[in-house]
Image (cartoon, helix red, strand yellow):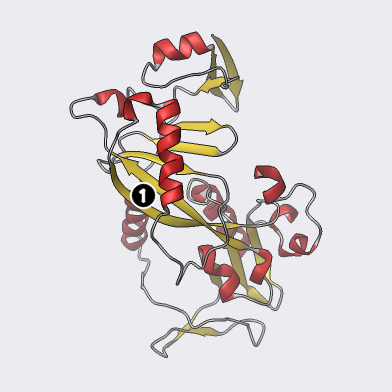
């Protein structure tokens, strides 16, 4: 076993024999060339984390409203004075930040539009054998299998089951009206993967599933930039499946930009989306 050090974190490089002894519930076949384990890594529950942020925000005097903004939104003046929600009410502000996930292109068709592509991503939850704790933490780590496809999973996952998801970009998806039922082909692919990598789960029942979406830019970088027609409008997006875990850093950077204490990285600027990608998303993951 060798230990690597990246950004102050210890990462153990395990042989297949070492990995099999440490994690006997995982089958490390000859196709696995490299095994990296980060003992201090963990995972977050997104819904709980967002609820906590909202609670803190309100405790510090913030006002939270759940409403839909009429789309598309094309600023008619600089600065933007207000936005109109579906009830017809106008909401005024000194600055606006739009972090609309897969709807960002639809909200701003003039400057984002098809430059960002929502993709359909299927997630599955399988039941583990009764009384068998080998697939829950701490016995089972969060895992990522970088093979022909990019497959990852989270143990236990808050009692929902053993999570398995395909991180490989799916087909383009309408996040509003798209079909939210998982496909038979996707379930079969997940089962085949379980049989190969987690043999004890070969016959595990499917106890839950969902369809989510990524919002992919051509180069897989985020969008953090001013709207070119309204200097007090900021656009945030392009998380490509990684937006949540980057949230604290992205939020801090965005707040600094809005307050004119920082400028966005050119790699995250809208202008770069009009240039041919040097290492695009599809090239990177295909």
The image quadrant where one finds the N terminus is: top right
Residue 210 lies left or right of residue 232; in this view the side is: left
Q: Is residue 224 above or below residue 75?
A: above
Q: Position of residue 228 (x, y in %)?
A: 71, 74
Residue 261 lies left or right of residue 56; in this view the side is: right
| Number of numbered discs on residues | 1
Q: Residue at x 51, y 68 (%)?
A: 174
Residue 79 lies left or right of residue 59; in this view the side is: right
Q: Determine which residue is flagged by label 1.
A: 49
Q: Nearer the viewer, residue 151 or 108?
A: 151
Q: Is residue 151 above or below residue 133?
A: below
Q: Position of residue 3 (x, y in %)?
A: 56, 14
Q: Residue at x 42, y 43 (%)?
A: 188
Q: Position of residue 7 (x, y in %)?
A: 60, 28
The image quadrant where one finds the C terminus is: top right
Q: Residue at x 35, y 60 (%)?
A: 60
Q: Nearer the viewer, residue 230 or 222?
A: 222
Q: Is residue 114 above or below residue 164?
A: below
């Amino acid at each position: 076993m060798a230990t690597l050090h990246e950004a102050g974190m210890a990462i153990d490089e395990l042989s297949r024999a070492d990995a099999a002894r440490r994690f006997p519930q995982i089958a490390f076949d000859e196709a696995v060339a490299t095994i990296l384990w980060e003992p201090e890594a963990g995972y977050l529950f997104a819904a709980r984390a967002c609820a906590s942020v909202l609670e803190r925000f309100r405790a510090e005097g913030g006002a939270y409203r759940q409403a839909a903004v009429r789309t598309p939104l094309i600023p008619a003046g600089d600065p933007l004075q207000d936005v109109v929600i579906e009830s017809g009410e106008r909401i005024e502000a000194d600055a606006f930040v739009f972090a609309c996930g897969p709807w960002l292109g639809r909200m701003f068709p003039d400057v984002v539009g098809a430059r960002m592509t929502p993709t359909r991503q299927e997630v599955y939850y399988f039941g583990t054998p009764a009384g068998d704790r080998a697939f829950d933490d701490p016995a089972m780590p969060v895992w990522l299998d970088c093979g022909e496809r990019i497959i990852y999973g989270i143990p236990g996952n808050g009692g929902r089951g053993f999570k398995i998801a395909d991180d490989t970009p799916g087909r383009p998806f309408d996040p509003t009206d798209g079909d939210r039922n998982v496909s038979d082909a996707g379930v079969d692919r997940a089962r085949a993967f379980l049989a190969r990598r987690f043999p004890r789960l070969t016959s595990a029942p499917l106890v839950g599933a969902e369809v989510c979406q990524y919002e992919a830019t051509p180069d897989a970088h985020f969008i953090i930039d001013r709207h070119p027609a309204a200097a007090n409008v900021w656009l945030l997006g392009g998380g490509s499946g990684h937006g949540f875990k980057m949230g604290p850093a992205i939020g801090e950077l965005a707040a600094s930009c809005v307050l004119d204490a920082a400028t966005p990285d050119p790699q995250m600027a809208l202008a770069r989306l009009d240039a041919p990608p040097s290492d695009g998303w599809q090239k990177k993951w295909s």
